[in-house]
Amino acid sequence: MASNALTGVNLGEFTEHRGVRECLQWFTREKQWINEIHLQLCRIPAPTFLEQERAAWFADQLRSLGWNAGWCAVSCRVAIAATLGLAATGRHGTFGP
């Protein structure tokens, strides 16, 4: 099994935890849906500095899933207000607590 030499974490042991295993199974079960959403996202034209349409679509998708999401038209950064804080993602990387 692969291990992280910096922290000594054995990934095989990590994936044996019930919650992690259930999460990984969810991705396996939802692979088709994930691929369809990804394809929809990729079909929205988003040339450099003109990503507004894609950012708005992404924020709409998050809101449809029950997330409190919005986006900044200037930086095209999508912000997600979560229970534990605020996270933002955009062309300049991911930001959050």
Image (cartoon, rainbow, N blue to C red):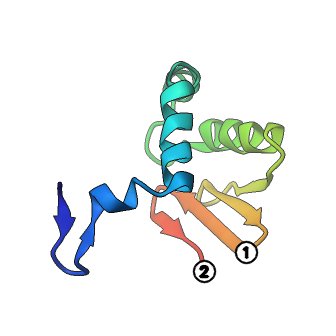
Residue for point 55% across, 29% down: 41
* Marks 2 and 1 close (CB-CB < 8 Å): yes
Q: Is residue 23 above or below residue 8?
A: above
Badge 2 amino acid: Pro
Residue for point 45% across, 37% down: 47
Q: Nearer the viewer, residue 3 or 83?
A: 3
Q: Nearer the viewer, residue 37 or 16?
A: 16
Q: Residues within 10 Å of mark 1 (few under 14, many from 20)?
A: few
Q: Nearer the viewer, residue 72 or 16?
A: 16
Mark 2 — residue?
97
Q: Quadrant of residue 97?
A: bottom right
Q: CA distance from mark 2 to mark 1?
A: 9 Å
Q: Is residue 19 left or right of residue 84?
A: left
Disc with the residue nearer the chain's start (2 vs 1): 1
Mark 1 — residue?
84
Q: Is residue 94 left or right of residue 52?
A: left
Badge 1 amino acid: Leu
Q: Nearer the viewer, mark 2 or mark 1?
A: 1
List x then y, in percent, for residue 17. Answer: 47, 58
Q: Quadrant of residue 63?
A: top right
Residue for point 70% across, 72% down: 86
Q: Secondary structure at mark 2?
A: loop
Q: Residues within 10 Å of mark 2 (few under 14, many from 20)?
A: few
Q: Is residue 38 left or right of residue 63?
A: left
List x then y, in percent, for residue 6. Answer: 20, 80
Residue 28 visible to an observer of this rendering? yes
Residue 44 visible to an observer of this rendering? no
Label annotation for residue 94: none
